[in-house]
Amino acid sequence: MNLDPTLNADLHCHSVISDGTLTPEALAERAAARGVQLWSLTDHDEIGGQARAIAAAKASGLAYLTGTEISVTFAGRVVHIVGLGFDHEAPEIVAGLRATRGGREARAREMAAGLAQVGIHGAFEGALKYVGNPDLISRTHFARFLVDAGHCGDISEVFRRFLTEGKPGFVAHKWAALKDAVGWITRAGGVAVIAHPGRYDFTPTEEYALITEFIGHGGRGIEVVTGSHAPHEFVKYADTALEFGLLASRGSDFHSPDESRIDLGALPPLAAQLTPVWAELEARIQH
């Protein structure tokens, strides 16, 4: 297949296995219908949907790379690392992600208790109705409940009022270490990618520290074109990829037809001077 930067690759999206609203099969069909040529399902801290995604991609005529999005703690904040093209049955990454998912139910109950203190009752049970995988109950599921129950007008308002640090429904979770997440991915034969770097609101010094530590642990890629970035950030992180010799990735971060900023396959292409992550993973692409 054509592996140049203009390939319509969508290497970041989520299914009901984590906090998306579509099944892996529906995502594959949607991606194919919207012109995606290379696809990856990257559920949060979870690879339980990979076998279904591989089969669905094949049925839809999509080339496929295995994927996940791992939450890590860096400089006191949550950063996401996408893994692509790894062996999804490798024992180390399976065990590492299982450990990372642990504690989500206890965290969710604490979130519900915080919301109850400001008069929003039944949030845990309400959020569970939106969960495809109870092991992965998350803030997004609480947000959907709060919107549908009429407490907020949209998901953004929920996070702004209730689910970010310092707000009533926020509870921190101990995520994986950056070193561990990158190691699980690379030792399973994949490439680790910093997801949507423009989202973290780091100072230049903090961002430099993230990138250099990531590279030091064996990280190889960075998302340049993503649904979480504004157009000027496409340019900024293209320059970052070139400056640090990183592979460039591209993905919509699609969660739902009703919630996502951009649909599968709708992103602009990577800049021609970049080396796309899929060029390094050609041997791991499944057809």
Image (tube, helix red, strand yellow):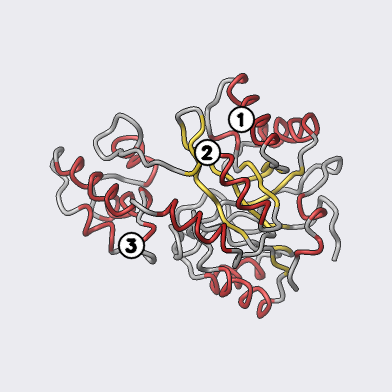
Residue 258 x %, y %:
45, 57
Callout 3, which amino acid? Tyr
Q: Is residue 223 above or below residue 287?
A: above
Mark 1 to mark 3: distance in Å?
A: 33 Å
Contact check, label 3 and label 2, Cβ < 8 Å: no
Q: Whole-percent x and y of residue 283?
A: 81, 64
Residue 216 sits in quarter = top right
Q: Amino acid at mark 2?
A: Val
Quickly name the residue at label 1: 210
Please give the residue where the numbered disc 2 appears in the rendered image.
Answer: 79
Report x, y in % for residue 45.
49, 54
Image quarter where the N terminus lies is: bottom right
In this rendering, position of residue 96 left or right of residue 55:
left
The residue tagged with tag 2: helix, strand or loop?
Answer: strand
For image coordinates 57% across by 42% down, the residue present is 228
The earlier-in-sequence mark between 1 and 2 is 2
Expressed as whole percent of the image width and height from the top left, the position of residue 19 reads: 43, 57
The residue located at (34%, 63%) in the rendering is 134
